[in-house]
Amino acid sequence: MSYDAGTITVLSGLEAIRHRPAMYVGSTGAEGVHHLVDEVVQNAVDEAMAGACSSIVVTLHADGSMSVEDNGRGIPTDAHPELGRPACEVVLTHVHAGGKFGGSGYHVAGGLHGVGLSCVNALSAWLSMDTWRGGQQHQQRFTRGNPDHDLKVVGEEDRTGTRIHFQPDPEIFSGATLSKSDLARRLQEQAFLHPGLQVRLIDEGTGLDQAYTYDTGIVGFVEHLNQGRSPLHKTLHLQGEADGIQVNVALQWTGSYAETISSYVNSIRTPQGGTHHDGMAHAITQAVNGYALANRLLNAEAEEEIAGYDIREGLTCVLSVKMPQPEFEGQTKTALTSKRAGPAVEGFISQALTSYMNANPSIAATIVGKALEASRARAAARRASERARYQLADAGIDKEVYLAQFGIRSKNWHESAIWLTHEELLQTHADLTRMPSDARVLDVCCGSGVVGASFKDRVGSVEGLDLTPEMIAMAETRLDKVHRGDVYDLPFEDNSYDMVVNREVLHLLPRPEQPVSEIFRVLKPGGQFVVGQLVPYSAVDAPWFFRVVKKKQPLFFNNFTQERFRSLLTNAGFEVVDEREVLQWEDIDLWIDTHETPNLMRHEIRDLYYNAPQEVREAHPFEVLPNGAIRDCWRWVVFSAIKPEA
Amino acid sequence: MSNNGDTPQQLQRGQAPSLIGSRTQENLEQAFSADAQAIQLFGYFAKIARIEGFAEAARTWEELAESQQQFTHGHLDFLKRVGEPLARQRMGETQQNLIAGIAIEQLDAANRLEEMAKTAHAEGFPDIASWFESLSDAKRVRIQRLQGDLEGTHGENR
């Protein structure tokens, strides 16, 4: 390749990408590598959207390189009119080049505004491009974005298509490894978005060869997302066009509490939503309220209205819009900013959903019923914490509030959080046992009885105590005997038990000193109290942790740090003899998907993670996955305390 | 704080005005406090608007909060002549500011927040009491961090 003015331009464009890779692909970690693969896959998907491609094969090679092959039209090889170089070389070496700039090649496209393939090329240690056109296979190889040689014909074959094989540059992405399950999920997503398109993932390292192809489109996608949930009706599918924007949306409400909305623009996922997402949200709010009002399901005189976030509770939805020249926030396209998408999507969905509800009154009644239930539950959650607080001012605690909340939760108790049945955590409690093998043990506020049951092979007998009949029934299957009663006033004589065990209860009880002194009272002198508590990592993440937990659970009253919990025990007269930490990663969606957490609060909790202060990030490990899902690393401390001998 | 009554201090001919103890100092502090509170309120509103899907309203709140920042910093440009308004320490250069910061956090952690927690317990708001206690704990840790930075500035000067 000659060294001339044209060359300089080419190189300076790609050097800029190598200089600030995060600006183009988001980060130089795993997320960045995902962007490279996505970018190449997106180019193949653009061919599929243009109706020219039916198969995409993504291969993770044993040497860490990856390739994407499609049977589209093949990148053109004829000379670029201005630069006089083969078009395919220009696409790989010029920033803002490609068929997606006002040309007639594509009506809608998702590639990174033409930064696309050249960006992948610039950030690859090497890249090899094959394009099949006009009966010939053309090939060109590049090193860090620079061509090794001119485009050459390497064979004759009667097919069309493109293969991009590249090695992410270790100088840029040092140590970053791509998540295969995440990649598989993204490919499956594309297969759902393009009915009939076959997307295949081959992993040479493990021998995995998985093909995704669906005829059901986004309706099938919604039903796939709802696996394991109980749908309340058949999936709604609304499809049409407004203001030159194609809108395709599938909706289904389930008995779950979580709101799962996936939105796409030209097949690109927009994890932070944007104007299309907001437009849809408003449309759903309008349509549901409009229908409810017209059918006298709301109190019109009181101007009753159901809030959008209550309506979206339990909604699983896939929104796919296709539009020319979309505008995004940032190069990595996390949110759509095109203003006209908002009213177009809102207008279409509002009208289409209203017609659908009018034509299907029983489904409409189900949707409105679910929304009203969410709205009432939110009001009840607010009242629960207010009522417990109010009651405490004079007498004791209002047991009705606890009965209601834990009675409902008992239905899916073990599904409501992984930690409930986590083996290591249960084992840590049991391992702290210091009492003899004939010890009489009480599991106080025993819930389903799993904690007490974990002690059974080490002690003589394990009894339980709980407030709600639902929990007592569950615990009776695991424990020797279950008493009904209240931890503020234990129905037992002084010095009755050798050991008391308890987990994750005291944070929910106002004036926790009283239950702790009750436990102290019923223990024999020399007896042991083993208690596990979820705690923040330190004083630094404590205020943030308080807000997270309070939004999840309105009955959260005590944000114990490890130190404060220890003081609670020692102030009651206990001698703390051991403290063991158990760390545990959990997807927070599971944890907040319960009736006690109103939908608005779920959003606020996510926001607390997304925008956690730096000090908190350093103190408290958690991770946000590329699809926006959050995993937290819970920190448990299990305390062992002894009631001193007289 | 102020020894002034309802009328502004009268300036004698040829006398340089003093901001210390003036009504104007008091007014700057009030304006600072109101504007600083408004920034936080707008930021809170912006988050709610984002969650509810009102991107335009969210942007408005965010941009108002951003400009308002200029207002509060403008108040501080004048107030630094007389000292910061929270713990009444001198302010201006980093070393002074760190000393002021430690004083502010000590005042909050050691006195104010613990008193607030006690009151909340007494009035039957255990969750709010626990919230104040968490803040008190967090502020104690901050004091250590600020003290570390302060030692760092001494090193610079040597």
Image (cartoon, rainbow, N blue to C red):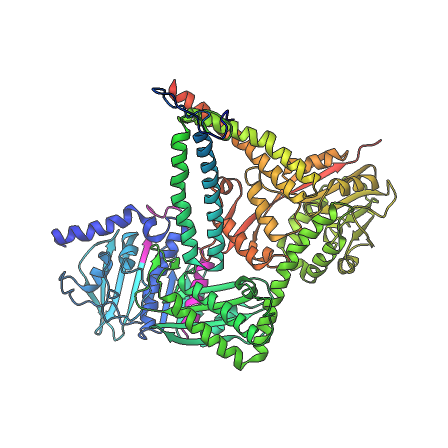
Q: Is residue B61 magenta?
A: no
A62 relative position to B101: left or right? left
Residue sticking out furthest to the top: B158
Residue B95 versus residue A563: which sits nearer the camera? Answer: B95
A580 up-or-down from B105: above or below: below
Question: Which residue is located at x 39 percent, y 68 percent?
Answer: A343
The picture places residue B126, in percent across and down from the top left corner, at 68, 43
Quadrant holding the C terminus of chain A: top right
Residue sticking out furthest to the bottom: A359
A558 relative position to A588: left or right? right
B65 up-or-down from B116: above or below: below
A80 up-or-down from A292: above or below: above
Question: Which residue is located at x 17 percent, y 63 percent?
Answer: A86
Give the magenta part as a residue range.
A166-195
Q: Is residue A22 visible?
A: yes
Q: Is residue A448 visible?
A: no
The picture places residue A260, in percent across and down from the top left corner, at 51, 63
A1 relative position to B71: left or right? left
Q: Is residue A180 magenta?
A: yes
The picture places residue A12, in percent across and down from the top left corner, at 20, 49
Question: Which residue is located at x 15 percent, y 53 percent?
Answer: A7
Quadrant holding the N terminus of chain A: bottom left
Residue B53 versus residue A86: which sits nearer the camera? Answer: B53
- Total number of numbered labels? 0
The picture places residue B150, in percent across and down from the top left corner, at 45, 25
Residue A369 versus residue A500: which sits nearer the camera? Answer: A369
